[in-house]
Amino acid sequence: MSAVDGLKRRFMEISQPDDDGVYRDGAAKRQARTTLAMDALRELWREACGSVSFAVPDSGVGLAAVGSLARGQVGPSSDLDLVLIYEPHALNDTQINELANKLWYPLWDSGLDLDHAVRTRAQCESVTDHDLPAAMGWLDVRAVAGDAALIETTAASILERWRKAARKRLPELLDSAAARLNEFGRLPYINQPDIKEARGGLRDTVLVSALAASWLADRPHGVYDEAVERLLDVRDCIHLVAGKDTNLLLAPYQARVAAMLGLADPTWPEAERAAYAIDDLQTLLARIGRRIAFSLDSTASRAEHSLVHEKPRFSFFQIMSPRGGGRREAPQFELVAPGVAKHEGELVLAPGVEPSLDATLALRVAVASGETGLPINPATLANLKRCPIRDSQWTQESRALFLRLLACGPELMRVWEEIDFVDLPGRWIPEWLGVRNRPSASAAHRYTIDRHSVEVVSRLARSHEGAAAGRDAPSAFGGTPPTIAGLGADGTTLDSHGGRKGNLSVEATREGPRGAYDDRHYAALLLAGLLHDVGKRAFVRDHAAEGARHVPVILRRMGFDEDIVGWATLLTREHLTLSDFATGRNPNDPAVGEELAARLDHDPVLLDMLFDLTRADGSSLGATAGESITKQYGWSAWREKLVIAMYSSARRSLRLE
């Protein structure tokens, strides 16, 4: 018998939820697992030292824990990260290998995964100097057994080297976060997230600690610490439900994880309980993920600024001028919009601006970010919460700004995620809160409904694809859509300052050389893209019809004219029609093309708009290279051909081909 026999089973036994099935006191359970693991490892060390063929010295060799065990965050099925550190003069290669085998083999048999290494102090320093994940893992070290002084001096040396190199390694650290974001997405917006690797997940908490350890910036506390502990509770419940070490919150686990977290309200009907609990779980993860992601962004921003400000900024003329007196330059602000300035690569509020007095300030900041590509400073984001936004108080300027924001193309997703952290979209459109963070019931959707909807808008260009598609043009989307000037309540086009430019004729642009939509049709298309899934509520059978009920209420409250309201409502109601016709009807039947045209009031521009919306919708489901999109879902080459054929059939019924 070994001291670590059945260690995974013992972890599971002390991790069980209460009698009512709810997992409580997660922090205490993590501490209990950590204590159990450390005690078992110390006993294993004594067993190993007593069973080897040589006398293990009291100094020069020791066993250290790193990773989640060192942080006291070990989960019910977490792997153990252990390092056997030794000095070459203390043990030879044969002896250290024999000791390592006496440690690793019983651990492999314990049921837990093991991440192990055998290194000298010099090797530890070398690895952490060149391997960023290893360096961050070594920022949390706990001596288990053996020469504690060796472990502590090694850890201190690595920490000192990290602090000395942090200024050079900061870009590498931030690049690693960006790479994970591209691969795993953001925690609030993924239907089946990896709660460790996704942005806002547990890996980001390690980055926050690494930045704090570098002394470039302090780490947040309070609500941030609460968010980390709650996310660890979610991780623990995933382990308990899955019975293995995994960070993927897969669909089969979600109802049980939600119930274990106490989100399954017993007052709900049993048939609906799981669905509502999963919604609440997604909302919980969104709140946690946004808090952790914002904490990382703000900590990284402070770290980057500290690098800038630790160098005195002297102007050449200040140095040469006697009046300069060698004083530092004042901070430089470049005004990019009223009340909005560029400062050190970020957008901030211009000096003297008071957010509580300006209802359109948040929109101006968001538009400036989307059109310049600059991120919004985290402190500025927090200040925007004080803007006096009223969902029933829209002006020509605010409508124009909102449409310019929607027309930002690929930048829209980033900007929307930033402003969503401070709850701005839900203040502009309260109905948005009904789909915010909601997982999609469709297996084809990787993203939550709100994330998918914003992605759809970002793919809607002013130069429509419909006319080109009907002529078998290439299927790639065009470039970034141009900025839309904006619209008044009566449909009059406004420039960026709210001044009138005059009405644009639909006929003048309907069959233009580049197939560009006029401002009013493009506005309706963008609004339909944003709101096409607003009817996706729990237990709603026809979300398109439900959405068509909400859209006119929303857009009339915002002050859009009746044409825009009508077009956006029709597109929302029919956003599945072209796709459904393409997969279930015969495009060579003239009656089918006529029926489709009739659904669109025999309007060729609406047909083009529906094609573009269908295409953006199908291509925004979010399947990754490792996933499959069936012929029933998504925008495959097969599906594109079917949709183009049906689109062409409707055009023929309109005598356009």
Image: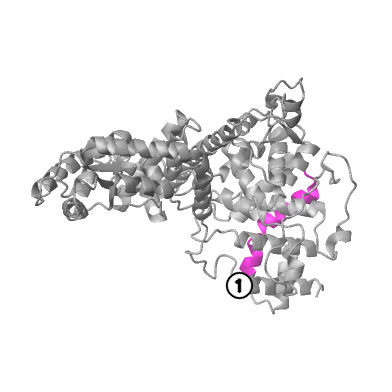
Point 47% across, 64% down: residue: 626
Give 580 or 639, whichever is nearer the viewer: 639
User: Which stretch is magenta?
Assistant: 559-581
> Position of 237 compared to 430: left or right?
left
- Does residue 186 appear in this view? no
Q: Nearer the viewer, residue 215 or 601?
A: 215
Residue 532 belongs to the span the image colors magenta: no
The residue nearer to you, when weighing 218 against 274, is: 218
The structure's colour scheme is one colour
- Name the amino acid, label 1: Ala
The secondary structure that most of the magenta stretch takes on is helix
Write down the quadrant of residue 312 in the picture: top right
Quadrant where the C terminus is found in the figure: bottom right
Measured as percent of width and height from the top left, residue 342 is found at: 70, 36
Give the residue at x 57% y 38%: 421
Q: Residue at x 41, y 39 (%)?
A: 161
Residue 101, x across and y down, in percent: 18, 54
Residue beneath label 1, please?
637
Asked if residue 408 can be seen in this view, the reply is yes
In this image, 591 relative to 299: left or right?
right
Q: Is 564 a magenta residue? A: yes
